[in-house]
Image (cartoon, rainbow, N blue to C red):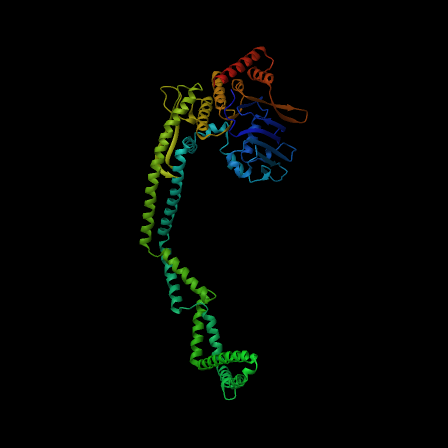
Amino acid sequence: MMPDNQHHPVLRDVVIEGLGLIDLAELTFQPGLNVLTGETGAGKTLVVTALQLLSGKRADKHSVQAGASRAVVQGAISPPPVQAAEWVHDEDEDLLIVREIAGIEGGRNRVRIQGRMAPVTQLETILSKVIELHGQHESLMMADADVQRSLLDRFDHATIAPLMEEWQGVWSQWRQARKLAHDARTNAAAHAREAAQLHREVDAIEAVNPYPGEEDDLKAQVLRIQHGEALANAYHSGVETLQGEGGVQDSLGAVITQFEQVAAMDPAIGIWTTRLNAISTDLNDVVSEIASQANQIETDASAFDTAMQRMAELKQLFRLYGATSTDVLAHADAARQRLMQIDGGEERLDELDEHVKTLRTDLNTIGERLHTARVHAATTLAAVVEDELADLAMGAATVHIHVEAGKPGPYGMDTVQFLITTNPGQPPVTLDKAASGGERSRIALALKVALADADHVPIMVFDEVDAGIGGQTAVMVGEKLQRLATTKQVLCVTHLAQIAAHADAHFLITKIQGKTTTTTTVNALDAQGREDEIARMLSGSPDEPVAKAHAKQLLTESARSTSLH
């Protein structure tokens, strides 16, 4: 039966060059279950490392092959995931990612997406919801309370994510409000001192009450007073010259009168007469303004002293609060605004405390809704995991997911704890205290399967998920992975023939030791190659008759199991 995941993103082609013991490996994965096998130490985990690099995990220069300047991992995902929309065009059938890791000799690490340089953080942004990697160490990580809370939230993402977003928005406001209230209370004395100083500054500026540009006006006034007599003489002389008997105005009037008498003889004279009349009018205005200015000239010592005193007052402000009157006024405005922030004392503290209480009430309301959603999700997830464990020869296991409300934190008010009872009559224990490594692996697999169905991860990678199991349980794990691979692409590193027999594609990882070099190769197996490899996994030899018969039986049963699904 062909996997029903053709429309989901699938990891098609992976090229690994210069990584660890791998000179060059080219893998073409299939949409269903892909297994990678090989003897212990052959380098199976290197393929998982390559996939981690494609997913944006941290690069280690020591993973570059000895003597190589760099390692290169290239992967093609088809069709491109929606998260890569900004990197692809409508006609692109694949998303091509290239990761270059510089060796110990130095150099730059590089990431290319669709041929364009990109920051490594983009890989996680694009692939975090596309590729789910599960290694052996994650079975232990699942015992962590924060990890368990995250797993539960992922299971009912549609319900919990909006509540979490709402919670974190109010949580951030509440923390900020608490800090403001704490700072206001802690700094009350300092604020009082600051306010007193600001009041003194504002009062000093308001007492002088400058206006913008006043210093320039005063400089001009002082200059006029200092040269008042000379200015007065010039003004009066000018008025006399322009307006006195026989002056400019009289001469201009005479010209106008003469032109008016002969205007009929030449049209041009009429135009000039009009212009001269306009000039005469302007001249009269100028004379009046000069005479008025002459009358305003101050020459007495008291006016000079008043102006100099005003300049001294302004200079005192300039020394303290700014280079110009405009700067001083701006300083006063800023001081008033700061006073509005810190004045008020107890009233301000009461307002801040009330705001904190309001936000805490809002948190409690959201937290209760979040708690209710998690309790409901916990009941459902526990039942789903129990069903999955029943398929993995742990039908007697009972899963308990406790959600206990407590103090508010970044992710709500809940503490989440996963407990399991593996046998009737036994008390529930935490996941890290499950009876065996095999049970922990199966619990981790059951959780991964349950979560994969919930959050629709299209590509799942398992690194030796079969640790600690064997026999019929291994067959059941293989069937579980096979069923999972009908809706997802699954890549699995395994050492168990019972799991490898269920593969849609089988890759053999082989370590080749020469006199001076050791390398690792990766090859896709045909039908006969699969049979030989499974026989080797069963007995240590691909030619052992009983092992070969058992390998054929496993492959036949796997094919039959596939047809049933």
Is residue 345 at least partly visible in the picture?
Answer: yes
Q: Residue at x 43, y 22 (%)?
A: 388
**558, 519: nearer the viewer:** 558
Q: Residue at x 40, y 41 (%)?
A: 168
- Residue 465: x and y in percent read 50, 24
Place residue 393 in its image quadrant.
Answer: top left
Place residue 76 in its image quadrant.
Answer: top right
Is residue 411 at least partly visible in the picture?
Answer: no
- Residue 154: x and y in percent read 43, 32
- Residue 292: x and y in percent read 45, 80
**470, 96: nearer the viewer:** 96
- Residue 521: x and y in percent read 62, 25
Question: Could you tell me how many numbered marks the image carries?
Answer: 0
**274, 338: nearer the viewer:** 274
Q: Does 100 sit left or right of 317 as displayed?
A: right
User: Given the current orientation, which residue lies at the most extreme front position?
Assistant: 264
Seen in the picture, residue 393 relative to 271 is either above or below; the reply is above
**432, 555: nearer the viewer:** 555
